[in-house]
Image (cartoon, helix red, strand yellow):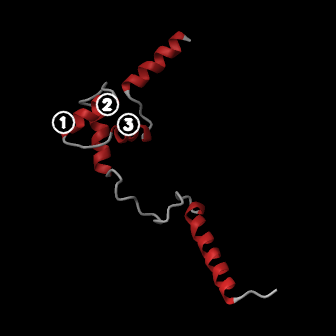
Amino acid sequence: MQMSERQRRVLSLLERLGRGRDLPARRGGSGSWQRGRSPKHRTSQEVREQVVMLRRGKYEGFNDQHFTEKLVEVEGLELARETVRRIPRRRRERSALAGRAFIRRRAEG
């Protein structure tokens, strides 16, 4: 069976797309088409470190919502509550309230 020129081009294109799509995933990446570049909207490392230091120090014991409000009002950092919640959790830290709830559940059960 012979393929037409158009069929060969389509097959070649599909093969290239298939190889390119899973190549970053094979290298341990996220499978992104950006190939190692971080997103433009990513929170910078300096801001993340500042959030962690403030969370451990000046605002220790604050819940995520209150902490986010203080970051905006006092520190001038405009971050979403979910971003503020996610930063310490990536570093395997939990909020003070979450720790107390864990201890309380353990004592009850």
Q: CA distance from mark 2 to mark 3?
A: 9 Å
For label 3, the crowd category at 10 Å Cα-Cα, with few meaning under 14, some 14 to 19 and many 20 or more, is: some
Q: CA distance from mark 1 to mark 3?
A: 17 Å
CB within 8 Å, label 2 to label 3: no
Is residue 17 toward the left or the right of residue 103 in the image?
A: right
Q: Residue at x 51, y 11 (%)?
A: 107
Task: Give the percent coordinates (x, y) of residue 13.
Answer: 61, 78
Q: Earlier in the sequence, mark 2 or mark 3?
A: 2
Tell me where residue 89 sits by quadrant: top left
Q: Quadrant of the C terminus?
A: top right
Q: Which residue position is annotated with label 1?
A: 73
Q: Residue at x 38, y 23 (%)?
A: 97
Which amino acid lies under the numbered mark 1 shown in the image of this protein?
A: Glu
Instruction: Report the residue that reaches farthest toward the top.
Output: 108
Q: Which residue position is annotated with label 2?
A: 65
Which amino acid lies under the numbered mark 2 shown in the image of this protein?
A: Gln
Instruction: Report the residue that reaches farthest toward the right.
Output: 1
CB within 8 Å, label 2 to label 1: no
Q: CA distance from mark 2 to mark 1?
A: 12 Å
Q: Is residue 8 above or below residue 43?
A: below
Q: Residue at x 78, y 88 (%)?
A: 2
State the SS at label 1: helix
Q: Which residue position is annotated with label 3?
A: 85
Which amino acid lies under the numbered mark 3 shown in the image of this protein?
A: Arg
Is residue 88 toward the left or the right of residue 21 in the image?
A: left
State the SS at label 3: helix
Task: Report the number of discs.
Answer: 3
